[in-house]
């Protein structure tokens, strides 16, 4: 998405240095970052936001970013109506789309075996996407705000009983 006033030039105002800067919902390694890399190239600089409203606010500020990347459709959840509402209320317009195949990964710290896992942490949607696999195990499922952040927290705590579900990029 880009400011409506810049929609005609393809959301490139920050590319003087060859590196577009866009806001995303999530943290380093999240699926929004993966989508941003697909659309803008691996050199894209992302501004990580906690909420989609923050993505919109930053994307609309030409001094902070060149635009934003956010999900508006999900094959399991369908249309993400709150994000459509945020777009309608903003001065932004959609300038492109990315279809992203979501491949979730169960991640643990080195040396942790499947039998060691007691808890799995991730975003509620990721847990839902993996429920067929997770249901085969007697693990406590813990909902977190972000897939990539869950992975980071498991790594930082060096837990030998907690796993995270996230993208390969988060690994």
Image (cartoon, grey):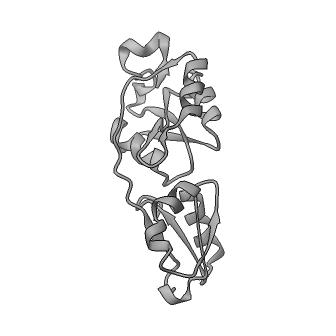
User: Which residue is drawn at the image coordinates 38% and 43% (left, top)?
Assistant: 37
Residue 123: image quadrant is bottom right
Residue 124: image quadrant is bottom right
The correct choice, above or below, for 14 with respect to 71 in the image is above
The correct choice, above or below, for 97 with respect to 33 in the image is above
User: Which residue is drawn at the image coordinates 53% and 78% (left, top)?
Assistant: 109
The correct choice, above or below, for 23 with respect to 127 in the image is above
- State the image coordinates of residue 115 (x, y, percent, origin top left): 51, 89
User: Which residue is drawn at the image coordinates 41% and 46% (left, top)?
Assistant: 75
Q: Nearer the viewer, residue 103 or 2?
A: 103
Question: Can residue 111 be seen here?
Answer: no
Q: Nearer the viewer, residue 138 or 86?
A: 138
Residue at the limit of the structure toward the top, as seen here: 5
User: Which residue is drawn at the image coordinates 62% and 79% (left, top)?
Assistant: 159
The correct choice, above or below, for 104 with respect to 138 in the image is above
- State the image coordinates of residue 78 (x, y, percent, origin top left): 46, 41
Q: Nearer the viewer, residue 159 or 20?
A: 159
């Amino acid at each position: 998405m880009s400011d409506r006033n810049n929609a005609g030039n393809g959301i490139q105002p920050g590319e003087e240095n060859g590196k577009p800067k866009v806001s995303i919902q999530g943290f380093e390694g999240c699926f929004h970052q993966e989508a941003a890399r697909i659309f803008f190239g691996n050199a894209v600089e992302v501004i990580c936001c906690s909420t989609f409203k923050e993505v919109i606010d930053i994307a609309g500020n030409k001094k902070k970013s060149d635009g934003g990347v956010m999900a508006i459709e999900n094959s399991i959840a369908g249309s993400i109506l709150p994000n459509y509402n945020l777009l309608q209320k903003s001065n932004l317009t959609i300038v492109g789309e990315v279809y992203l195949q979501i491949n979730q990964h169960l991640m643990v710290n080195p040396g942790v075996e499947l039998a060691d896992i007691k808890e799995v942490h991730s975003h509620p949607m990721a847990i839902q996407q993996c429920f067929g696999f997770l249901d085969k195990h007697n693990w406590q499922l813990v909902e977190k705000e972000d897939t990539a952040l869950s992975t980071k927290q498991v790594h930082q705590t060096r837990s030998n009983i907690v796993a995270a579900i996230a993208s390969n990029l988060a690994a």
